Image (cartoon, rainbow, N blue to C red):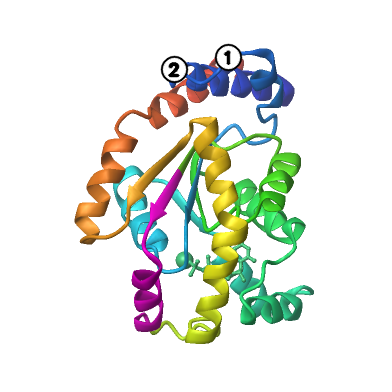
Amino acid sequence: MLRRISSHLNQASYCLRALEGFSTDATTLSSFSKEVPQFIAFVLGGPGSGKGTQCSKIVETYGFTHLSAGDLLRNEISCSSKNGSMILELIKEGKIVPSEVTVKLIQKAIRSGENHKYLIDGFPRTEENRLAYERIIGAPPNLVLFFDCPEEEMVKRVLNRNEGRVDDNEEIVKKRLQVFRELSLPVVDYYLKKGILHKINAVGTEDDIFEQVRTIFSVYEFDRFRDQVESNELQVE
Ligand code: UDP
Ligand code: MG
């Protein structure tokens, strides 16, 4: 029965993608997840671009589960997992943690979550991250948000936020911006070309910025997707 449910879930995923005007060719279908039929949105942007703040508003308004890749990694440090000290050394230097480690944490969080819509904040940060995600999870995201913010503004915000993070200091924020420019912007470009990235002007009040998010989200039918999944489950019960 599980297999049947999974096939119904895939069918529901496909229906949603078709509804949203995604390509319906064989490649898209075969690469779509057998494992993660949920609605996945990646949230990209440099350090201090407001990803976390806007994710909280999306959670409140649209009922997504927020998975911050940075928080998942910091959690590994604080619970002294086997990778904890390696992760700490990399974060302290503004470097990227090996893809496999981050993707496995994301996968675990999605598997143990009960929701059908997830925001993955601050990931993928490199093309290698992106490829590892697609390989391990088996599907691309449904949508990507990109918070576009000038570097001076990002530096100002990071240095003012006082969250006690080891990497929120002048020297490391410069390194993080360089990593963002060199390694993360190509990922932004990739999704732009795929036609699933929405660019948001990240300068303004929290509410102004959220209005842009609302406009983007208004065309996605997350709950129709859930309803499809539920009605298919009822049929196989
Ligand atoms: N990080 C990483 N891979 C990820 C996400 C984060 O290696 O997919 C590390 C990286 O060192 C980064 C740090 O965690 O500089 C903090 O990331 P976070 O997203 O919390 O920072 P933000 O960009 O929101 O300031
Ligand atoms: Mg953040």
- Residue 100 visible in the current orientation: yes
For the residues labelled 1 and 2, the Cα–Cα distance comes to 10 Å
> Looking at the picture, which amino acid does disc 1 mark?
Thr
Instruction: Pinpoint residue 147: horizontal percent, then vertical percent.
Output: 39, 54
Rendering quarter of residue 2: top right
- Residue at 38 percent of width and 44 percent of height: 199
> Looking at the picture, which amino acid does disc 2 mark?
Leu
* Circle 1 SS class: loop
- Residue at 64 percent of width and 80 percent of height: 93
Instruction: Pinpoint residue 18: horizontal percent, then vertical percent.
Output: 50, 16
Rendering quarter of residue 20: top left
Left or right: residue 202 versus residue 29 is: left
Callout 2 crowding tier (Cα within 10 Å): few <14, some 14–19, many ≥20: few
In the rendered image, residue 156 lying in the magenta stretch gets the answer yes
Q: Which residue is mark 1?
A: 24
Q: Which residue is mark 2?
A: 19
Callout 1 crowding tier (Cα within 10 Å): few <14, some 14–19, many ≥20: few
Instruction: Pinpoint residue 51: horizontal percent, then vertical percent.
Output: 41, 59
The magenta stretch is 145-161
Vertical position of residue 203 compared to residue 134: above or below: below
